[in-house]
């Protein structure tokens, strides 16, 4: 699996958009970009994933650059409950257990402030 | 509605005393995973089941075993816990390899 690079921490004001960057310069053509988050003392929670097109769901938007070497997770109106560690993971879609694994990096700790 | 349930949420065991953590799911997912998360670290996959097929990660210590008696339940057995096994243990499920994983709240294990 390709590795990802994320800033260790970020702050965001409540009500503003939170933009979390992720670099994945060695991503392969069959690898998707996944985002999970982990609120303190809880299990990780799936947010969104994409291959090359931008994606949006009720939680967030995912913007992937045209060369697919980086992406940004956008929380459009951050709340205090969005304070968490955000993990960007690249993961192939294939038919074996190896390609299906989630390999977590250190993530970005997002602190949403009042 | 809880979908991935882990019991207990907190477990204290003594050094060397076997301990079992349990996970159950109401999602009828094919795949169940166990992760270990030590303090201030990211979750690390220990092993997983696809239906009854067991897949062990290469660096998972032999001290860790797992059982999946049916689709809904999966157990993590630590045969002889050491102080270094103190961690949060996370169970997750997914429909298949390429689907998103749903995590339980975790069991925090303390070894005294």
Image (spheres, rainbow, N blue to C red):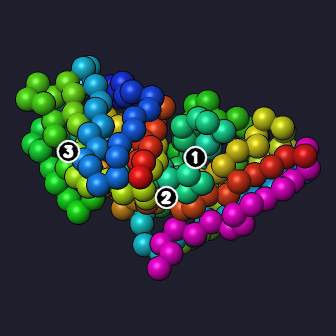
Q: Position of residue B38 (x, y in %)?
A: 66, 39
Whether B52 is drawn above or below A105: the answer is: below
Taking depth in this image into account, of A19 and B23 the one nearest to the observer is: A19
Q: Chain of mark 3?
A: A
Dots 1 and 3 on the same chain: no
User: Mark 1 vs mark 2: which is more N-terminal?
Assistant: 1
A16 relative to B71 in the view: left or right: left
Given the image, what chain letter belongs to the residue carrying mark 2? B
Q: Would you name the residue on which mark 2 appears?
A: B103
> Where on the picture, by quarter, is residue A102?
top left
Residue identifier under label 1: B35
Disc 1 or disc 3, which is closer to the eye?
3
Q: CA distance from mark 3 to mark 2?
A: 21 Å
Residue in the picture at 61% in, 30% down: B59
Give the x, y percent position of residue A9.
44, 32
Q: Residue at x 70, y 44 (%)?
A: B87
Q: Is residue B9 magenta?
A: yes
Element on which disc 1 rests: strand
Q: Residue at x 35, y 37 (%)?
A: A88
Q: Residue at label 3?
A: A62
In which quadrant of the rendered view does residue A29 lie?
Answer: top left
The magenta segment is B1-15
Q: Identify the image quadrant of the N terminus of chain A.
A: top left
Tell whether label 2 touches label 1 (CB within 8 Å).
no
Q: Position of residue A11 (x, y in %)?
A: 39, 38
């Amino acid at each position: 699996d390709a590795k990802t690079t994320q800033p260790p921490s970020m702050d965001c004001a409540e009500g503003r958009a939170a933009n979390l960057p992720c670099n994945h310069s060695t991503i392969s053509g069959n690898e998707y970009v996944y985002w999970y988050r982990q609120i303190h003392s809880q299990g990780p929670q799936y947010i969104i994933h994409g291959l090359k097109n931008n994606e949006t769901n009720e939680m967030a938007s995912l913007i992937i650059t045209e060369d697919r070497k980086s992406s940004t997770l956008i929380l459009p109106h951050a709340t205090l409950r969005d304070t968490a560690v955000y993990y960007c993971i690249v993961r192939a879609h294939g038919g074996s257990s190896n390609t299906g694994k989630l390999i977590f990096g250190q993530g970005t700790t997002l602190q949403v402030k009042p | 509605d809880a979908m991935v349930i882990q019991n207990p949420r907190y477990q204290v065991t003594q050094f060397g005393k076997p301990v079992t953590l349990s996970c159950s799911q109401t999602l009828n997912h094919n795949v169940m995973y166990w992760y270990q998360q030590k303090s201030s670290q990211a979750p690390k996959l220990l092993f997983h089941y696809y239906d009854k097929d067991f897949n062990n990660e290469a660096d998972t210590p032999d001290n860790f075993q797992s059982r999946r008696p049916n689709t809904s339940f999966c157990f993590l057995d630590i045969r002889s816990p050491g102080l270094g096994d103190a961690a949060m243990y996370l169970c997750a499920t997914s429909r298949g390899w390429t689907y998103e994983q749903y995590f339980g709240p975790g069991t925090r294990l303390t070894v005294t």
